[in-house]
Image (cartoon, rainbow, N blue to C red):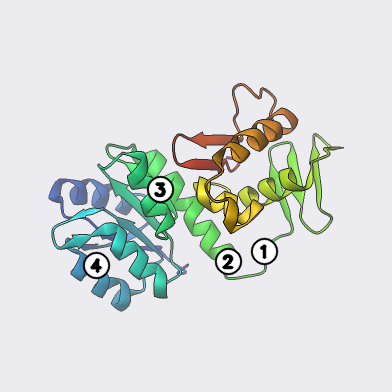
Amino acid sequence: MSTNRPRVLLIEDEPQMRRFLRASLDGNGFELIEASTAAEGRSMAASYAPELVLLDLGLPDGDGVSLARELRGWARMPIIVISAQGREANKVEALDAGADDYLTKPFGVNELLARMRVALRHAAAAGGTPSPVFDFGDVRLDLQKRLVSRAGAEVHLTPNEYRLFAVLAQHAGKVLTHSHLLKEVWGPGCSQQTHYLRVYMAQLRQKLEADPARPKLLLTEPGVGYRLKEPA
């Protein structure tokens, strides 16, 4: 991150949305640069080295998913999709193409800012030595000791439960698709076995949530995947 204001590249063809985000981001400590086409966005991403990209999918000269995949091929900055395309298939496609998060229009500026802060924290952590300890309220994960505790008491997790929680913890705040989680935990041959996730996520909630029926830590993104909520 820069020492002053984080630079954000907005790739969006709607003038009204650009005006809204220009005022919102400028007033919250971000430097905004704008592009209205995929070609312009591609050029500005290379020229200005933004610390985060906000990307609309419906661009006049190209597919935003293809642009996300292209940017991810050479750049490490976080990409947050902001789109009116709210279908589950659109979200999964964008996230699998390399986007870090997905917000459906219309959205609240506070939610966008929170997602941006999470993405920038992840990018900053990736540039250094990641901490082996993660705290989520009263739940703690110590990667070095392979230990999970809740309110100071050790919680026994099966090997698959532990791997699933560890993957979510290392990407806390980010939506991880079903296929991504299945490949990470069970291997490439299980990328379609979504029932595995339902079973193991229910088991994790029983062990880590105060009220498993109303989870506040292990969140479902319907039809897309799961997200581990970062503590406020």
Secondary element at tag 4: helix
Q: Which residue, given by chain and number where applicable, does mark 1 sit on?
A: 130
Q: Is 93 placed left or right of 188 in the picture?
A: left
Can residue 177 be seen?
no
Please state which amino acid type lies under the numbered disc 4.
Gly
Rendered image: mark on residue 24: none
Separation (CA) of disc 2 from disc 4: 24 Å
Q: Earlier in the sequence, mark 3 or mark 1?
A: 3
Please state which amino acid type lies under the numbered disc 2.
Ala
Q: Which residue, given by chain and number where applicable, does mark 3 sit on?
A: 92
Q: Earlier in the sequence, mark 4 or mark 3?
A: 4
Percent x, y for residue 56? 26, 53
Separation (CA) of disc 1 from disc 4: 31 Å
Are the two marked residues, 3 and 1, in contact with CB atoms closer than 8 angstroms?
no
Q: Which residue, given by chain and number where applicable, does mark 4 sit on?
A: 41
Q: Which residue, given by chain and number where applicable, does mark 2 sit on?
A: 126
Residue drawn 53% across and 46% down? 173
Q: Quadrant of the C terminus?
A: top right
* Image: 104 above or below 169: above
